Image (cartoon, helix red, strand yellow):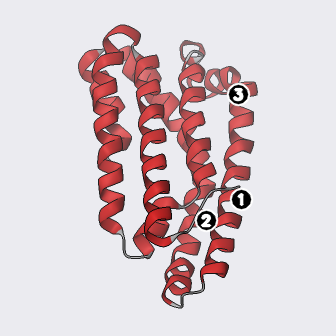
């Protein structure tokens, strides 16, 4: 949760209220892309735990890959709409002054696509007994987010905040992917 609002908090400290408002709109709209993934993860979490406890590695690997593919399909579909009609969406929902929020939302949507590509990493680590690794990887992503926000927001404003969030998303997904592979030999990616 803290990682999700770090960019907004730091943008609020290091930028103007107008910039925060526009960026918040971008966060809200791009956040819709996660809805399909979060819904799917909620459904498969008990299956992950059951298959792992039964040592059904082949079935679990198949579930993870199919889930990641579905997550990627949902997320890419939404991202495509955002990339093709983002400015129009923001103008319709928020007014003409928010059209440039589409640019930030596009950057943030790339992060959602990356999360979907890597699949249900955190859920898999948590459901297989490796919650501490989830916390460590998320913590590393949070540290990257704070550091990059400090470096990028003063010079690039909301674009810097969006890029910091994207970089931190990439960081914790790579770390969780490596942790999952090392601890369980499972891969949760769409490929």
Q: Which mark is residue 52?
A: none
Check contact, mark 2 vs mark 1: CB within 8 A: yes
Q: Quadrant of residue 153?
A: top left
Q: Secondary structure at mark 2?
A: helix
Q: Residues within 10 Å of mark 1 (few under 14, many from 20)?
A: some
Residue drawn at 44 percent across, 75 percent down: 127
Badge nearest the viewer, 2 or 1? 1
Residue drawn at 48 percent across, 48 percent down: 173
* Residue with the mark numbered 2: 40
Q: Quadrant of residue 131?
A: bottom left
* Residue with the mark numbered 3: 83
In the image, residue 118 above or below residue 185? above
The answer to which of marks 2 and 3 sits earlier in the sequence is 2
Q: Secondary structure at mark 1?
A: helix
| Frontmost residue, 97 versus 80 | 80
* Residue with the mark numbered 1: 70
Outermost residue, bottom direction? 54
Residue drawn at 51 percent across, 82 percent down: 52
């Amino acid at each position: 949760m803290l990682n999700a609002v770090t960019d907004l908090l730091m943008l609020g400290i290091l930028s103007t209220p107008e910039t925060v408002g526009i960026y918040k709109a971008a966060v809200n709209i791009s956040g819709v892309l996660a809805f399909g993934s979060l819904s799917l993860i909620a459904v498969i979490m008990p299956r992950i735990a059951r298959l792992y406890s039964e040592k059904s590695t082949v079935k679990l690997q198949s579930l993870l890959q199919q889930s990641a593919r579905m997550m990627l399909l949902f997320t890419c579909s939404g991202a495509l709409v955002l990339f093709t009609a983002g400015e129009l969406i923001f103008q319709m929902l928020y007014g003409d002054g928010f059209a440039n929020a589409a640019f930030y939302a596009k950057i943030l949507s790339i992060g959602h696509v990356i999360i979907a590509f890597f699949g249900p990493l955190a859920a898999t680590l948590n459901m297989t007994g490796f919650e501490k690794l989830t916390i460590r990887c998320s913590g590393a992503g949070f540290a990257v987010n704070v550091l990059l926000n400090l470096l990028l927001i003063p010079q690039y404003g909301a674009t810097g905040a969006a890029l910091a969030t994207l970089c931190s998303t990439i960081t914790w997904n790579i770390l969780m992917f490596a942790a999952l592979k090392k601890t369980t030999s499972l891969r949760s990616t769409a490929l």
